[in-house]
Image: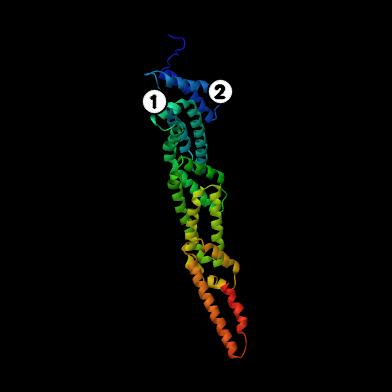
Amino acid sequence: MAMNERKTIDLEQGWEFMQKGITKLKNILEGLPEPQFSSEDYMMLYTTIYNMCTQKPPHDYSQQLYDKYRESFEEYITSTVLPSLREKHDEFMLRELVKRWANHKVMVRWLSRFFHYLDRYFIARRSLPPLNEVGLTCFRDLVYQELNGKVRDAVISLIDQEREGEQIDRALLKNVLDIFVEIGMGQMDYYENDFEAAMLKDTAAYYSRKASNWILDDSCPDYMLKAEECLKREKDRVSHYLHSSSEPKLLEKVQHELLSVYATQLLEKEHSGCHALLRDDKVEDLSRMFRLFSKIPRGLDPVSGIFKQHVTAEGTALVKQAEDAASNKKVGLLMTIPTLANYLM
């Protein structure tokens, strides 16, 4: 045997050594007493993979190691991660999920370093999914697919609790919803289909219930104050934990349920609707009405209709008043013109 010819490592022997390193990593993730990886540990693990991938056939174990890389995640998830999540519910499940996702990303980062030679050569030549993608896909297929429905319902429940004035852990929701985004690996499909669609449906139902009570109990100014505050709070939710792409869809749902559905009833309230606000010169309330209804499609059409009726009625009254004054040989017409102009400014 030549001096520079290295000893062949068989699959079973090499994998036994790699498993010790993987077990050490799992123990660290589980918080068990285990020293951190030294640079020597890392180099030994990396070199073992390198050697097993560069041996002459039939001892090139690249494909087997690629498969075992994936199996390492599957085994850990099945034996440890899923049982820890299945035994928890609601907010406790969400906290465990955030922890397990963070740990999983650490595990992917470390194992992909140990197996890095596969990424550089074997995977590139075979056009296979890279190691990072394989690791994240394992979590998606085994953990996310099983639990995303329960997670979605728990998050929506917390959002509704916050809408009712309760304090919730916004940072927790942000971390959970980041999983829906990250699991898509650059695509928003999982966030939009598995969370956002249900959240928007719940939002519409929530504000439909609120609006049906408020429209009966509140004056038009009070109702508009509540609507404005709701829109502000929903924008605040986006800035704290929802994805930014949800904002226009979320606000559209709120505006539809609070304003579009009840526009006619709200604007025509007998003692506090648009007619009354114009009659009593309620500038602040009219400004709020303009702000709110200008954001919905054709929302200002009924407002402008009422405004036109009001100006026409006031103008007619002022002209009649001037005519009466003229018939009584008074010169009140000139004094009424600025008053009419005020409504047309």
* Image quarter in which the C terminus is found: bottom right
Task: Count residues near mark 1 (Cα–Cα under 10 Å), then give few for <14, some for 14-19, many for 20+.
Answer: some
Q: Position of residue 149 (x, y in %)?
A: 43, 44
Task: Count residues near mark 2 (Cα–Cα under 10 Å), then give few for <14, some for 14-19, many for 20+.
Answer: few
As drawn, the label of residue 39 is 2
Q: Position of residue 173 (x, y in %)?
A: 53, 45
Give the amino acid at mark 1. Gln
Q: Position of residue 13 (x, y in %)?
A: 43, 18
Q: CA distance from mark 1 to mark 2?
A: 26 Å
| Secondary structure beneath label 1 | helix
Please say whether residue 334 is visible from this viewpoint. yes
Residue sitting at x 63%, y 81%: 335
| Secondary structure beneath label 2 | helix
In this picture the colour scheme is rainbow
In this view of the protein, which residue sits in the foreground, 323 or 88? 323
Residue sitting at x 56%, y 44%: 171
In this view of the protein, which residue sits in the foreground, 318 or 78? 318
Give the amino acid at mark 2. Ser
The total of numbered circles placed on residues is: 2
Residue sitting at x 58%, y 84%: 321
Residue farthest toward the top in the current orientation of the protein: 1
Residue 293 to residue 246: above or below: below
Residue 54 to residue 309: above or below: above
Q: Disc 1 designates what residue?
A: 63
Q: Position of residue 3 (x, y in %)?
A: 46, 9
